[in-house]
Every structure is written in structure tokens, then in C-alpha cells.
Image (spheres, rainbow, N blue to C red):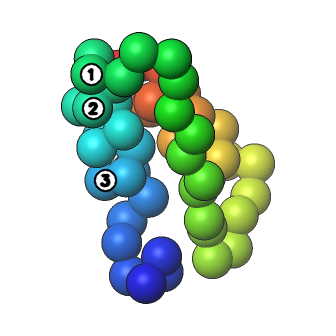
Amino acid sequence: TVWEIKQKILVDLAIDRGCYIDQSQSLNIYMDQPNFGKLTSLHFYAWSK
């Protein structure tokens, strides 16, 4: 399920397939206990890739 997969791995997979996508892709991020620090960290991780 979504809770068993680390969301950072999903971001990495989305980044890897990005060069094969013509238009855009959508990715939902699920966090058990989201907070500003976790969300910002993941956002900047994806942005830096």
C-alpha cells in the first residue's frame, strides 16, 4: 500500500521517468504525520534533482 513505500522512492521513480513524458505527470505524496520540515525537505529534494 501507499504507507509501505517510502515517498522519496516514488519521487525518484517520477524523476527517472520524466524524460519519457511528453506533457506532464502528477504525483501524490502521502505522509503519516506531515509537518512543515518533512514536506519542505521532500520538496527541495525533488527540486534539486
The N terminus sits in image quarter: bottom left
Residue type, mark 3 in image? Ile
* Furthest-right residue in this view: 36
Compared to residue 37, the image places residue 49 above or below, namely above
Residue type, mark 1 in image? Tyr
Lateral position of residue 48 relative to residue 40, left or right? left
Q: Which mark is residue 2?
A: none
* Image marks 3 and 1: residues in contact by CB distance under 8 Å: no
Residue type, mark 2 in image? Arg
- Depth check: give the residue in front, 1 or 24: 24
- Of tags 2 and 3, the one toward the viewer is 2
Q: Can you identify the residue that label 3 sits on?
A: 9
Q: Secondary structure at mark 1?
A: helix
- Residue sitting at 65 percent across and 47 percent down? 39
Picture coordinates of residue 3, whole percent (x, y):
48, 80
As measured in the structure, the alpha-carbon distance from the residue carrying label 1 to the one carrying label 2 is 6 Å
Compared to residue 38, the image places residue 3 above or below, namely below
- Depth check: give the residue in front, 16 or 49: 16
Q: Can you identify the residue that label 2 sits on?
A: 17
* Image marks 1 and 2: residues in contact by CB distance under 8 Å: yes
- Residue sitting at 30 percent across and 40 percent down? 12
- Residue sitting at 36 percent across and 72 percent down? 5
